Image: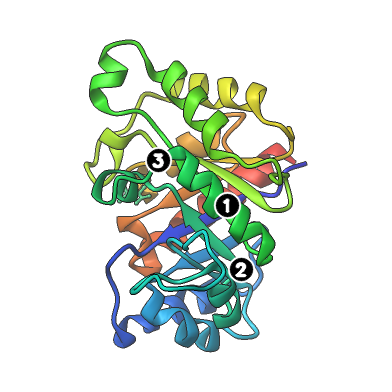
Amino acid sequence: MRRKLAAGNWKMHGLAADLAEATALARAHPAPTVDVLLCPPATLICRMVGALARTPVAVGAQDCHASVSGAHTGDISAAMLADAGACHVILGHSERRADHGETSAQVAAKATAAHAAGLVAIVCLGETEAQRDAGQTLAVVSEQLRQSLPESADAENTVIAYEPVWAIGTGRTPTLEQIAEVHDHLRGLLPDPAIRLLYGGSVKPANAADIFAIANVDGALVGGAALKAADFGAIVAALEAAEGGAG
Ligand code: PEP
């Protein structure tokens, strides 16, 4: 059975004072029955790892460079993230694909680097609203999956996050049927059927239980609602309840 995962993406949010939200989350969920992960900005990784030591809440990063080291001012390698205490790295988030022109081939190279450094790669994909309206959703995510996953990908080192671009940070979500359709489709394409498939895009305490009841949804990648311990904790609790129901 695939262990469920609640992953929080803090994006470019968070100063030292906000570590209190991470420690409050860990205090409220001292023994979660699902995996719980927070991905703060790089500046907070070390301190969050320290603050969450001896708790079950893991710490990840939001991007890495494909090289181990070199003349890449401002970039951070996967080995450096692992050295800082991160165990996961989000790759190919739609904001990086849009803001930095990242291609799926680059995402695959970064995932290879992440695997070599011992990190779990959370590979993101999803269609734009125009692509959905044009009936291209399944074709788009299939091609992104094919191009973004490196040969090294397996259930131990890779998680996929399906995140419709138009649902991220907008408060809008696909219907449950639409989420199920994409997850069922992706499951059939995975090189390892045990790879976990997260849904991401405006997951909140109010909609989490319905989304987690979908068969091929193994958890969530959460942006805005991961910034507050109370909200993310409620999502963790909904995922635990779904796992209990499934088990
Ligand atoms: C995300 O950034 O991956 C995300 C899903 O954001 P939000 O939950 O805010 O839509």
Label 1 environment density (alpha carbons within 10 Å; few <14, some 14–19, many ≥20): many
The front one of 61 and 172 is 61
Q: Position of residue 83 (x, y in %)?
A: 59, 81
Mark 3 C-beta to ligand 1 under 8 Å: no
Badge 3 crowding class, 10 Å Cα cut-off, few under 14, some 14 to 19, many 20 or more, is: some
Q: What percent of the width, then of the height, locates residue 138? A: 46, 18
Marking on residue 111:
1
| Mark 2: C-beta under 8 Å from nearest atom of ligand 1 | no
**Looking at the image, how many numbered discs can be counted on the residues?**
3
Q: Position of residue 10 (x, y in %)?
A: 35, 64
Secondary structure under the numbered disc 2 in the rendered image: loop
Front-most of 120 and 30?
120
Question: Does the rendering let one see residue 247?
Answer: yes
Q: Name the N-terminal-most of marks 2 and 1.
A: 2
- Tell me the residue at 53%/54% (across/down): 110
Note whether residue 162 is visible.
no
Secondary-structure class at tag 3: loop
Residue carrying label 2? 87
What residue appears at the point 66 percent right and 70 percent down from the top-left corner?
A: 31
Q: Is residue 33 above or below residue 173?
A: below
Rounded to the nearest whole Å, what is the CA distance between mark 3 and mark 2? 23 Å
Q: Is residue 211 left or right of residue 18?
A: right
* Residue 205, horizontal then vertical, whole percent: 38, 50
Which numbered marker is on residue 103? 3
Query: Is 209 located above or below residue 22 in the figure?
Result: above
